[in-house]
Amino acid sequence: MSTVLITGAEGMIGSRLSEHLFEHGHDIVEFEGDVTDPMAWKPYQDDDYSFVIHLAALAGVRDSFDKPDLYYHNNVEGTYQALEFAWEVQARVLYASSSNAWEWWGNPYATTKKMNEVQAQGRNAIGMRFHTIWPGRDDMLFRMLERGDVEYINVHHTRDFLHVDDLVDGIRRTMENFDDVLTQHPVVDYGTGHSTSVEAVAKVMGFEGQYRDTNPPGERVHTKADIEWLLKLGWTPQRNILDVSCHPK
């Protein structure tokens, strides 16, 4: 159907997306190298790509306070190179933003994601604001609860938890309807459209530690995706984080 160049293809989202797109008939090319280095893109210039999906980035709110320059270099410079490459080869772009960009002033990570959205304007690119993807990385709540590495839970926090398999299905549908989506929504949310209590998730997963009324600096208290655009594409989330039968073993 099309050839897709994916950065960050070895990551949790990228690996699932590569497999999902391949199963639906797309040819996948995995980018190897430093996305911030323009020379690393040179070996890919002779191929014909329908899409560049840029997922490679530094993620996480708390670490960004300690390493703002590194986050800027990886996230902003890396996205710039991806956009420049795609422009040269005339490929359409989907790039990873974040729900944190809704409150981009809250932490350096969120700021880099908002900067990506600004520099992508007019670039035939769609920004993908991922909400809380589970099972997620090893440093994210779901995995930490699985390992028993959580010290306490913030009782007032709610998140829009989206399973990675539902996410990649949504990304594919965005690709298949790229021009229509871009015309109306150059930046889009990915989530379930529902906000779930972090406390409820912790209890379902058997957490017996402390529950506190606190909020770490820079973290959003409530998140909820606007997915009306995605529902119109025929997509619906298939997994609920509170359903223990959906949890990987």
Image (cartoon, rainbow, N blue to C red):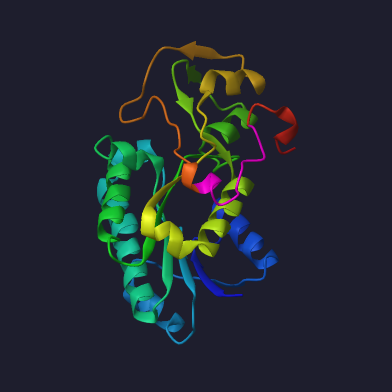
Residue 56 visible? The answer is: no
Image spot of residue 46 (x, y percent) = 45, 87
Quadrant of residue 142 in the image? Answer: top right
Give residue 92's position: percent from left, percent from top. 42, 70
Left or right relative to 210: residue 220: left
Quadrant in the picture for residue 88: bottom left
Q: Is residue 203 left or right of residue 115?
A: right
Report the residue at 62% width, 71% height from top. Answer: 26
Which residue is nearer to you in this view: 140 or 196?
196
Residue 96 visible:
yes
Residue 99: image quadrant is top left
* Quadrant placement of the C terminus: top right
Q: Decide: is 60 above or below 180.
A: above
Q: Is residue 21 above or below residue 118?
A: below
Where is residue 101 drawn, in percent x and y? 33, 42
Q: Residue shown at 26%/60% (left/top)?
A: 119
Q: Locate the N terminus and report the quarter of the image it occupies.
A: bottom right
Residue 146 lies in magenta, yes or no? no
Quick check: 133 above or below 75? above
Residue 238 magenta-highlighted: yes
Rendered residue at 41%/49% (across/down): 188
Main SS, magenta region, reads: loop
Q: Please, which residue is most extreme toward the bottom here?
A: 46
Front in this rendered view, residue 237 or 216: 237
Q: Which residues make up the magenta segment?
A: 230-240
The one of 132 and 208 positioned closer to us in this rendering: 132
Residue 74 in the figure: left or right of residue 153? left
198 with respect to 35 (left or right): right
Q: Residue 106: x and y, percent?
A: 27, 34
**Rendered position, 105 above or below 57:** above
